[in-house]
Amino acid sequence: MNIEHVKLFIRVAACHNISLAGKEMGLSAAVASSHINKLEESLGVRLIHRTTRKVSLTEDGVAFLPHAQEVISSVDIACASVGSRKLSPTGKLRITAPASFGRMHLIPALHDFMSLYPDLTVDIRLSDSIVDLVEGGFDVAIRNAALNDSSLIARKIAADTRQVCASPDYLAKHGTPKTPQDLLNHQCIDLMGFDTWTFNTSEGEQQIKIKYFLRADNGEAIRDAAIYGLGLTICSKWCAYKAIEKGQLIPVLTDTPLVSNTSIWAVYPSSHLLAPKVRVFIDYLKAHFGEVPYWEI
């Protein structure tokens, strides 16, 4: 039984498409189909029902899948146990990350990382949607949202402080809010899903359900909308720090900071032993951003 054929079968089971699974592993559709055929021949059973549009597992395929996953997990652990002896990790590192953070901070950080580990290839997907790591075949995800899946492990990479900002033009025209309650009389820009802003006041936490003037689903978009004077918004410092340095945005309500427990996390599937390529990537990011990342200074 060929281990690469088993890995391909697991990916086919996840995405229900032989061509797509093959492409993720650097194989043509014809070669991927041939590998599945060879795996079925070696086992003496049919694992997959094939149609013109998609594939599905047979009863034998369903029964074989958890054992296949266990075999590959054991192989990965065995390789990881000796991986630290290699001069450099090898193979493909598949990463998923939020679009804005990925463009602004992760892509620039990859230059030195890939110079340090030239035998690694990096496959990165930038998306603001929460991607299923296992189904998507990703090694690690960079996230700034809470971890809801208990089967995953999260390691903090950097701080993610958030603050309310507006442009000088907006504040000159509409005035500067002095208390969180004042926000009810202002134009606010909402990041999708964050229409309740919680502040730490001298009287305890205060929640303000804003009446948004504009809503968007991307951090850079709401930052830019604030720069253009469209209203007040919440920005992560990693997204807004350059605009603040240039005077394009001004933080407000600094005496009543936002209540936020967000951070930048590296998230990966639970395993007895972390693969060397993932370990060096996470260690590199922690060192790159440091205890106090440059956007927090």
Image (cartoon, rainbow, N blue to C red):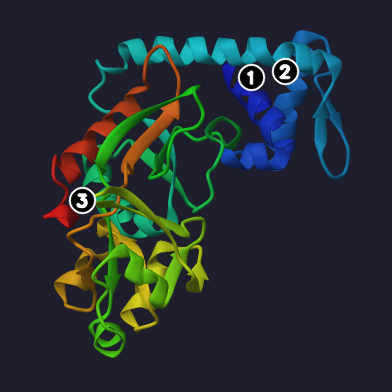
Circle 1: residue type: Val
The tag on residue 6 is 1
Percent coordinates x, y for residue 234 in the rendering: 35, 63
Picture coordinates of residue 191, whole percent (x, y): 46, 62
Q: CA distance from mark 2 to mark 3?
A: 66 Å
The amino acid pointed to by label 2 is Leu
Which residue carries the number 2 mark? 39
Q: CA distance from mark 2 to mark 1?
A: 7 Å
Mark 2 or 3, closer to the camera: 3
2 and 1 marks in contact (CB < 8 Å): yes
Q: Position of residue 143 (x, y in %)?
A: 40, 43
Residue at the disc numbered 3: 202
Q: Amino acid at mark 3?
A: Ser
205 lies above or below 152: below
Q: Is residue 184 left or right of residue 176?
A: right
Q: Is residue 64 above or below residue 10?
A: above
Question: Could you tell which of marks 2 and 1 lies nearer the N-terminus?
Answer: 1
